Amino acid sequence: MKIYTPTELGTAQPYLEDPELAALAKKFARLHYASLGAPAGLGQGDFRRAVLAGKYPELFESVMRANQAKAAKLETALSKAPAILEALTLPEGWRARIENQSIVLNGPFIQELVPRLGRVGRFDRDRKAWIVPISSVGGLKRIFENVNKILTAATEQSASAQKIKNIQRWLGYVQNKAAQGILYQRGIEELKALDIRDYPNYADQLDEAVRLAQSARTHSARTTSTTSYETARFEPLNRTLVAMTDMPAMHTPVRHGDHIVVFEKRGTSFRINEDHPSLHGEHLLGREGDPGCYVYWRMASEEEIADLLQREKAGTENRLTAHFPWKPR
Protein backbone atom coordinates (compact mmCIF):
# COMPACT_ATOMS: atom_id res chain seq x y z
CA MET A 1 0.00 0.00 0.00
CA LYS A 2 1.17 3.54 -0.79
CA ILE A 3 2.19 5.66 2.19
CA TYR A 4 0.06 8.80 2.48
CA THR A 5 0.74 11.98 4.48
CA PRO A 6 -1.83 13.42 6.91
CA THR A 7 -2.44 16.23 4.39
CA GLU A 8 -3.28 13.75 1.65
CA LEU A 9 -5.47 11.74 4.03
CA GLY A 10 -7.38 14.93 4.85
CA THR A 11 -9.07 14.90 1.44
CA ALA A 12 -11.49 12.42 -0.15
CA GLN A 13 -9.41 11.95 -3.30
CA PRO A 14 -7.02 9.14 -2.14
CA TYR A 15 -9.92 7.06 -0.77
CA LEU A 16 -11.66 7.26 -4.14
CA GLU A 17 -8.55 6.32 -6.10
CA ASP A 18 -7.10 3.63 -3.81
CA PRO A 19 -9.50 0.70 -3.08
CA GLU A 20 -7.08 -0.81 -0.54
CA LEU A 21 -6.96 2.47 1.36
CA ALA A 22 -10.75 2.74 1.23
CA ALA A 23 -11.15 -0.79 2.63
CA LEU A 24 -8.80 0.04 5.48
CA ALA A 25 -10.72 3.29 6.16
CA LYS A 26 -14.03 1.40 6.36
CA LYS A 27 -12.48 -1.06 8.79
CA PHE A 28 -11.18 1.87 10.85
CA ALA A 29 -14.68 3.37 10.92
CA ARG A 30 -16.21 0.08 12.07
CA LEU A 31 -13.67 -0.47 14.86
CA HIS A 32 -13.62 3.10 16.15
CA TYR A 33 -17.26 4.08 15.86
CA ALA A 34 -17.97 3.55 19.55
CA SER A 35 -15.08 5.79 20.65
CA LEU A 36 -15.30 8.48 17.94
CA GLY A 37 -18.53 8.39 15.92
CA ALA A 38 -21.10 7.82 18.62
CA PRO A 39 -19.77 10.58 20.95
CA ALA A 40 -19.95 12.96 17.99
CA GLY A 41 -23.62 12.09 17.48
CA LEU A 42 -23.05 10.39 14.16
CA GLY A 43 -24.65 7.21 12.94
CA GLN A 44 -22.41 4.39 11.74
CA GLY A 45 -22.99 5.24 8.07
CA ASP A 46 -22.38 8.95 8.64
CA PHE A 47 -19.19 8.19 10.56
CA ARG A 48 -17.91 5.93 7.78
CA ARG A 49 -18.57 8.61 5.18
CA ALA A 50 -16.81 11.19 7.35
CA VAL A 51 -13.70 8.99 7.54
CA LEU A 52 -13.75 8.49 3.74
CA ALA A 53 -14.11 12.27 3.34
CA GLY A 54 -10.83 12.81 5.22
CA LYS A 55 -12.26 14.10 8.53
CA TYR A 56 -9.88 12.04 10.75
CA PRO A 57 -6.51 12.11 8.94
CA GLU A 58 -4.18 12.03 11.98
CA LEU A 59 -5.96 9.11 13.68
CA PHE A 60 -6.32 7.18 10.46
CA GLU A 61 -2.66 7.73 9.58
CA SER A 62 -1.56 5.93 12.78
CA VAL A 63 -3.83 3.01 11.92
CA MET A 64 -2.53 2.94 8.35
CA ARG A 65 1.09 2.86 9.49
CA ALA A 66 0.33 0.08 12.00
CA ASN A 67 -1.29 -1.88 9.20
CA GLN A 68 1.73 -1.33 6.97
CA ALA A 69 4.04 -2.56 9.74
CA LYS A 70 1.87 -5.64 10.14
CA ALA A 71 1.99 -6.27 6.39
CA ALA A 72 5.77 -5.93 6.40
CA LYS A 73 6.01 -8.40 9.28
CA LEU A 74 3.78 -10.83 7.41
CA GLU A 75 5.92 -10.53 4.29
CA THR A 76 9.04 -11.24 6.33
CA ALA A 77 7.40 -14.25 7.96
CA LEU A 78 6.34 -15.60 4.57
CA SER A 79 9.88 -15.35 3.28
CA LYS A 80 11.36 -17.11 6.33
CA ALA A 81 8.65 -19.74 6.84
CA PRO A 82 9.90 -22.38 4.36
CA ALA A 83 13.39 -22.46 5.89
CA ILE A 84 12.00 -22.55 9.44
CA LEU A 85 9.62 -25.41 8.61
CA GLU A 86 12.43 -27.31 6.91
CA ALA A 87 14.53 -27.03 10.06
CA LEU A 88 11.75 -28.16 12.40
CA THR A 89 12.19 -31.53 14.10
CA LEU A 90 8.63 -32.76 14.14
CA PRO A 91 7.46 -35.74 16.23
CA GLU A 92 6.96 -39.00 14.39
CA GLY A 93 3.95 -38.90 12.07
CA TRP A 94 3.64 -35.09 12.07
CA ARG A 95 3.65 -32.89 8.94
CA ALA A 96 3.72 -29.12 8.37
CA ARG A 97 2.92 -27.15 5.23
CA ILE A 98 2.18 -23.57 4.20
CA GLU A 99 -1.27 -22.65 2.90
CA ASN A 100 -1.85 -19.01 1.96
CA GLN A 101 -0.92 -17.04 5.10
CA SER A 102 -1.14 -19.96 7.51
CA ILE A 103 0.82 -23.03 8.55
CA VAL A 104 -1.14 -26.27 8.66
CA LEU A 105 0.08 -28.93 11.11
CA ASN A 106 -1.33 -32.39 11.66
CA GLY A 107 -0.25 -35.67 13.18
CA PRO A 108 -0.99 -38.19 15.96
CA PHE A 109 -2.38 -36.82 19.21
CA ILE A 110 0.28 -35.60 21.64
CA GLN A 111 -1.05 -34.16 24.88
CA GLU A 112 1.97 -31.93 25.45
CA LEU A 113 1.38 -30.13 22.13
CA VAL A 114 -2.25 -29.17 22.74
CA PRO A 115 -1.82 -26.21 25.12
CA ARG A 116 1.29 -24.95 23.31
CA LEU A 117 -0.22 -24.92 19.83
CA GLY A 118 -3.41 -23.53 21.30
CA ARG A 119 -1.52 -20.39 22.35
CA VAL A 120 -0.37 -19.62 18.78
CA GLY A 121 -3.13 -21.11 16.65
CA ARG A 122 -6.43 -22.98 16.59
CA PHE A 123 -7.53 -26.56 15.94
CA ASP A 124 -9.73 -27.11 12.88
CA ARG A 125 -11.97 -30.07 13.75
CA ASP A 126 -13.12 -30.58 10.18
CA ARG A 127 -9.60 -30.81 8.81
CA LYS A 128 -8.23 -32.40 12.00
CA ALA A 129 -5.29 -30.03 11.81
CA TRP A 130 -3.77 -27.09 13.66
CA ILE A 131 -3.92 -23.76 11.82
CA VAL A 132 -1.18 -21.34 12.90
CA PRO A 133 -0.80 -17.81 11.45
CA ILE A 134 2.33 -17.44 9.36
CA SER A 135 3.42 -14.60 11.65
CA SER A 136 3.84 -17.13 14.48
CA VAL A 137 6.17 -19.41 12.54
CA GLY A 138 9.13 -18.41 14.70
CA GLY A 139 7.40 -19.70 17.83
CA LEU A 140 6.90 -23.17 16.35
CA LYS A 141 10.62 -23.92 16.58
CA ARG A 142 10.61 -23.32 20.32
CA ILE A 143 7.36 -25.26 20.80
CA PHE A 144 8.58 -28.41 19.06
CA GLU A 145 12.02 -28.24 20.67
CA ASN A 146 10.43 -28.22 24.13
CA VAL A 147 7.94 -30.97 23.32
CA ASN A 148 10.64 -33.17 21.77
CA LYS A 149 12.67 -32.86 24.98
CA ILE A 150 9.64 -33.97 27.00
CA LEU A 151 8.95 -36.90 24.67
CA THR A 152 12.62 -37.99 24.68
CA ALA A 153 12.76 -37.90 28.47
CA ALA A 154 9.54 -39.94 28.67
CA THR A 155 10.93 -42.50 26.21
CA GLU A 156 14.18 -42.82 28.16
CA GLN A 157 12.27 -43.20 31.41
CA SER A 158 10.08 -45.90 29.87
CA ALA A 159 13.16 -47.73 28.52
CA SER A 160 14.82 -47.56 31.93
CA ALA A 161 11.69 -48.90 33.62
CA GLN A 162 11.50 -51.76 31.10
CA LYS A 163 15.17 -52.56 31.68
CA ILE A 164 14.63 -52.79 35.44
CA LYS A 165 11.57 -54.97 34.84
CA ASN A 166 13.66 -57.34 32.71
CA ILE A 167 16.39 -57.43 35.36
CA GLN A 168 13.83 -58.34 38.00
CA ARG A 169 12.38 -61.07 35.77
CA TRP A 170 15.72 -62.74 34.97
CA LEU A 171 16.95 -62.31 38.54
CA GLY A 172 13.82 -64.13 39.69
CA TYR A 173 14.68 -67.04 37.38
CA VAL A 174 18.22 -67.22 38.76
CA GLN A 175 17.06 -67.01 42.38
CA ASN A 176 14.41 -69.70 41.90
CA LYS A 177 16.95 -72.02 40.31
CA ALA A 178 19.50 -71.24 43.01
CA ALA A 179 17.00 -72.34 45.66
CA GLN A 180 17.00 -75.73 43.88
CA GLY A 181 20.78 -75.89 43.83
CA ILE A 182 21.00 -74.95 40.14
CA LEU A 183 23.29 -72.30 38.69
CA TYR A 184 21.19 -70.86 35.85
CA GLN A 185 23.87 -69.77 33.39
CA ARG A 186 21.55 -68.32 30.77
CA GLY A 187 19.91 -66.09 33.36
CA ILE A 188 23.32 -64.86 34.50
CA GLU A 189 24.32 -64.04 30.92
CA GLU A 190 21.05 -62.17 30.31
CA LEU A 191 21.62 -60.12 33.47
CA LYS A 192 25.15 -59.25 32.36
CA ALA A 193 23.75 -58.04 29.03
CA LEU A 194 21.27 -55.87 30.96
CA ASP A 195 24.20 -54.22 32.83
CA ILE A 196 23.04 -55.46 36.22
CA ARG A 197 26.26 -54.10 37.77
CA ASP A 198 24.85 -50.62 37.20
CA TYR A 199 22.21 -51.49 39.82
CA PRO A 200 24.10 -52.38 43.04
CA ASN A 201 21.03 -53.70 44.87
CA TYR A 202 20.20 -56.19 42.13
CA ALA A 203 23.87 -57.05 41.62
CA ASP A 204 24.14 -58.00 45.31
CA GLN A 205 21.07 -60.24 44.98
CA LEU A 206 22.62 -61.94 41.96
CA ASP A 207 25.89 -62.57 43.83
CA GLU A 208 23.95 -64.06 46.73
CA ALA A 209 21.99 -66.35 44.38
CA VAL A 210 25.21 -67.56 42.72
CA ARG A 211 26.75 -68.31 46.13
CA LEU A 212 23.61 -70.17 47.17
CA ALA A 213 23.58 -72.30 44.01
CA GLN A 214 27.29 -73.11 44.24
CA SER A 215 26.97 -74.02 47.91
CA ALA A 216 23.96 -76.25 47.23
CA ARG A 217 25.77 -78.01 44.36
CA THR A 218 28.81 -78.68 46.55
CA HIS A 219 26.62 -80.06 49.34
CA SER A 220 24.68 -82.22 46.87
CA ALA A 221 27.88 -83.70 45.47
CA ARG A 222 29.01 -84.71 48.96
CA THR A 223 25.74 -86.26 50.07
CA THR A 224 24.22 -87.86 46.96
CA SER A 225 26.38 -90.98 47.09
CA THR A 226 25.39 -91.73 50.70
CA THR A 227 21.66 -91.09 50.33
CA SER A 228 19.62 -94.26 50.72
CA TYR A 229 16.24 -94.88 49.15
CA GLU A 230 14.57 -94.89 52.56
CA THR A 231 15.89 -91.39 53.20
CA ALA A 232 15.32 -90.05 49.71
CA ARG A 233 11.70 -91.10 49.42
CA PHE A 234 10.75 -88.92 52.41
CA GLU A 235 12.56 -85.81 51.14
CA PRO A 236 10.42 -83.10 49.54
CA LEU A 237 10.01 -83.79 45.84
CA ASN A 238 11.41 -81.38 43.29
CA ARG A 239 9.07 -80.29 40.57
CA THR A 240 9.73 -79.41 36.95
CA LEU A 241 7.42 -77.83 34.41
CA VAL A 242 7.25 -79.88 31.18
CA ALA A 243 5.18 -79.93 28.02
CA MET A 244 2.90 -82.97 27.75
CA THR A 245 4.80 -84.07 24.65
CA ASP A 246 7.99 -84.30 26.74
CA MET A 247 6.58 -86.46 29.56
CA PRO A 248 9.35 -88.59 31.21
CA ALA A 249 9.03 -92.22 32.31
CA MET A 250 7.63 -92.66 35.85
CA HIS A 251 8.79 -94.77 38.82
CA THR A 252 12.03 -95.88 37.23
CA PRO A 253 15.54 -94.42 37.36
CA VAL A 254 16.30 -92.26 34.31
CA ARG A 255 18.98 -89.82 33.32
CA HIS A 256 17.98 -86.22 33.88
CA GLY A 257 20.83 -84.01 32.72
CA ASP A 258 23.89 -84.90 34.80
CA HIS A 259 21.85 -86.76 37.43
CA ILE A 260 19.93 -89.98 37.74
CA VAL A 261 16.49 -89.37 39.16
CA VAL A 262 13.13 -91.05 39.66
CA PHE A 263 9.97 -89.26 38.56
CA GLU A 264 7.30 -90.13 41.11
CA LYS A 265 4.15 -88.40 39.87
CA ARG A 266 2.67 -85.75 37.60
CA GLY A 267 0.32 -82.90 38.34
CA THR A 268 -2.84 -81.68 36.66
CA SER A 269 -2.39 -80.53 33.06
CA PHE A 270 -2.91 -76.90 32.07
CA ARG A 271 -1.99 -74.51 29.27
CA ILE A 272 1.50 -73.07 29.61
CA ASN A 273 1.50 -69.29 29.50
CA GLU A 274 4.05 -66.50 29.80
CA ASP A 275 3.36 -66.07 33.53
CA HIS A 276 4.63 -69.51 34.53
CA PRO A 277 8.34 -68.66 34.20
CA SER A 278 8.10 -65.66 36.55
CA LEU A 279 6.03 -67.63 39.04
CA HIS A 280 7.91 -70.91 39.11
CA GLY A 281 11.35 -70.28 37.66
CA GLU A 282 10.99 -72.62 34.69
CA HIS A 283 11.89 -71.45 31.19
CA LEU A 284 9.87 -72.87 28.34
CA LEU A 285 10.18 -70.21 25.67
CA GLY A 286 8.15 -71.00 22.60
CA ARG A 287 5.84 -73.44 24.39
CA GLU A 288 3.25 -70.86 25.51
CA GLY A 289 -0.20 -72.24 24.75
CA ASP A 290 0.94 -75.89 24.73
CA PRO A 291 -0.52 -78.31 27.29
CA GLY A 292 1.86 -79.00 30.16
CA CYS A 293 2.07 -80.05 33.79
CA TYR A 294 4.47 -80.35 36.70
CA VAL A 295 6.32 -83.63 37.23
CA TYR A 296 7.69 -84.38 40.68
CA TRP A 297 11.00 -86.17 41.14
CA ARG A 298 13.67 -87.21 43.63
CA MET A 299 17.31 -88.24 43.35
CA ALA A 300 17.75 -91.96 42.70
CA SER A 301 19.10 -94.14 45.48
CA GLU A 302 22.39 -96.06 45.18
CA GLU A 303 20.51 -99.25 44.37
CA GLU A 304 18.47 -97.54 41.65
CA ILE A 305 21.56 -95.96 40.15
CA ALA A 306 23.35 -99.31 40.11
CA ASP A 307 20.35 -100.96 38.48
CA LEU A 308 20.26 -98.38 35.66
CA LEU A 309 24.00 -98.60 35.10
CA GLN A 310 23.82 -102.40 34.96
CA ARG A 311 21.00 -102.32 32.42
CA GLU A 312 22.87 -99.85 30.29
CA LYS A 313 26.04 -101.89 30.44
CA ALA A 314 24.33 -105.15 29.58
CA GLY A 315 22.45 -103.52 26.73
CA THR A 316 19.23 -105.28 27.74
CA GLU A 317 17.23 -102.12 27.59
CA ASN A 318 17.49 -98.81 25.82
CA ARG A 319 18.55 -95.95 27.96
CA LEU A 320 15.58 -94.14 29.39
CA THR A 321 16.33 -90.49 28.96
CA ALA A 322 14.19 -87.53 29.98
CA HIS A 323 14.14 -84.93 27.20
CA PHE A 324 13.41 -81.30 28.06
CA PRO A 325 13.52 -78.11 25.97
CA TRP A 326 15.77 -76.42 28.51
CA LYS A 327 19.43 -77.10 29.21
CA PRO A 328 19.89 -80.17 31.50
CA ARG A 329 21.44 -79.65 34.87
Image: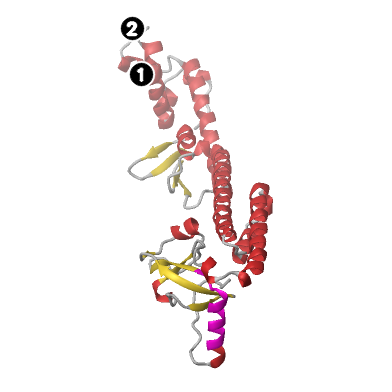
Please state the extent of the stretch shown in magenta in the rendering: 298-311
Q: Residue at x 66, y 49 (%)?
A: 199
In the picture, measured across the screen, residue 191 lies left or right of residue 106, that is: right
1 or 109, which lies in front? Answer: 109
Residue 3 appears in the rendering: yes
Q: Residue at x 47, y 56 (%)?
A: 279
Residue 210 location (% of width, % of height): 66, 59
70 to 113, vertically: above or below: above
Element at badge 2?
A: loop
In magenta segment, residue 310: yes
Which amino acid lies under the numbered mark 1 shown in the image of this protein? Arg
Q: Which secondary structure type mostly characterizes the magenta part of the structure?
A: helix
244 to 96, vertically: above or below: below
Residue 158 location (% of width, % of height): 54, 48
Residue 187 location (% of width, % of height): 59, 62
Q: Are marks 2 and 1 in contact (CB under 8 Å)?
A: no
In the picture, measured across the screen, residue 269 lies left or right of residue 161, that is: left
Q: Which residue is mark 1?
A: 48
Q: Which residue is mark 2?
A: 41
64 or 290, which lies in front? Answer: 290
Q: Which quarter of the figure has residue 123? A: top left
Residue 296 location (% of width, % of height): 46, 67
Q: CA distance from mark 2 to mark 1?
A: 13 Å
In magenta segment, residue 263: no
158 to 326, vertically: above or below: above
Element at badge 1?
A: helix
